[in-house]
Image (cartoon, grey):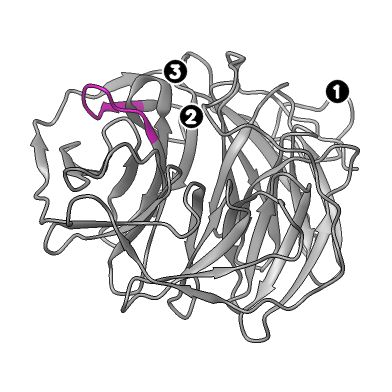
Amino acid sequence: MTKVWLIIFAAGLLLTGCGEPSEQPAATAPAAAKSEPVAQEPTALPTAPAAAQPTDTPAPSPTLTETPVPPPTATPIGAPAEPTPATPTVEPGQVAEPVLLEYPIPPGSRPHDVAPAPDGSVWYTAQAIGELGRLDPATGETQHIPLGAGSAPHGVIVGPDGAPWVTDGGLNAIVRVDPDTSAVDIFPLPAGTGYTNLNTATFDQSGVLWFTGQSGVYGRLDPQVGQVEAWAAPRGQGPYGIATTPDGNVYYASLAGSHIAQIDLESSKALVIEPPTPGQGARRVWSDSRGQIWVSEWNSGQLSRYEPATGAWQAWRLPGSNPKPYAVYVDEADMVWLSDFGANALVRFDPNQETFEVFELPSPGANVRQILGRPGEVWGAESGTDKLVVVRK
C-alpha cells in the first residue's frame, strides 16, 4: 500500500452520508462469465413527455470565496514523514511520482460530483446548499452560483458547449449554467413524472444528454429543442452512474437493481445486462478506449469489466478487509481509478498488470462519491470533508 504524504491545503468539515440507498452485504465473486443483453421496451411514465423550455433564472451575483492561505504546495507520494513544503523537482529522464492535493471549499457545501473544465477550473455540485461551485486550482478561490429554491444538485458534467450541466434532484430538472454570465437555465422533467431522484448524466455523440434517476427513471434532453423525455427503467429503482463509450454507446448502472444496461439511442429501449455476481450493487460505470465497460460494485467490493464484443465479464476484488468501491473512472492511459469508502482512499488499477495501488486520503471520512479527470489529473469530490481532491500524475 502506498503511503501518501502531502501538505493539506486547509482543514475541512467532517460531514455524514449523502442520502444514498442503504448498503447491502458483500457478495462473493464468481469466475468470468458471459452475459447476453435482454431488450426491454421503454415504459412510458404517467404523462407523455412534452417539450420543456428552460426556465430562465436571472443571473445571480456569485459568491466569491477567497481562501486566506497561499496556493497549495504539492508533495510527492512516498515522500519522507516531514516533507519540505515545495514542489519536487524532476531530473530529465525521470518519471515524476503522483502528487495528491486537497482543496477546501466553503463549509457545508457537501460536494457530490466534480467536473474539470477545459479552462483549468473545476466545477462541483454543492449538494447541501443548492449551489454549483467553481474552483480555481491556481489560487484556491471558489465561486458559488445558486441554482434556485429547493435545489439539491447531484451530478455535473461539462457539455460539448463548454457549459456545466447538472442533474438536480431537488428541482427534478436538468440545469445548465452559463460559464461566462452565471445565468441558470432549468429544464424540468415532464409534468406527472414524479420525484425521480436524479443522479448523473452523459452526452452522446449527437450532443443529446442522457440521464438517470434512482427512483427508476432514465431519460434524455435534446438541448437544441429543449425537449426532456423520461421512461420507467426496466426492473424499477436503481439507475445511477451513466457513461458514453468512444463509439457512441451509452450504458448506465443500476445500484438497487444490481445490473448494467445499454440504451438503444434510436428506440430508447434499455437493454439489461446481468453481471455474474448476484446482488453486486453496480454503482457507476465508465468506458475505456476500447469500449469495455468498467463497473464499481458497491456491495461486492469488486471492480468488474464487461466486454460488449464477447459478452464476457471479469472481476477483481479491491484490496483490504472491507472495500466499498463507489466511483469509477478510466483515465487517458486506460488506468482505472476508484474511490474506496472502506479504505478512505483513491485506488488505481492497472489492467495490464492486474494490480491495485492505493492512495490513502489524509482527511478521515472523505467519502469521495465521484471521480472525473483530464489529461494528467484525476479529481474527486470529498462529500464528507468539504474538499476537492486531485491526483496529478
How many neighbours does mark 3 have within 10 angstroms: few (below 14), some (14-19), or many (20 or more)? many
Q: Which mark is residue 106?
A: 3
The answer to whether marks 3 and 1 mark residues whose Cβ atoms lie closer than 8 Å is no
User: 311 left or right of 249?
Assistant: right
Residue kind at label 1, given as amino acid type: Glu
The spot of residue 98 in percent (x, y) is 74, 48
Say which residue appears at 32% left-offset and 77% top-offset.
Answer: 267
Q: Which mark is residue 82?
A: 1
Whole-number angstrom distance, CA of label 3 to CA of label 1: 28 Å
Query: What kind of element bears circle 1?
Result: loop
Does residue 23 show up?
Answer: yes
* Disc nearest the viewer among 1 and 2: 2
Magenta range is 143-153
Q: Earlier in the sequence, mark 1 or mark 2?
A: 1
User: 10 left or right of 114?
Assistant: right
Q: Is residue 316 above or below residue 368?
A: below
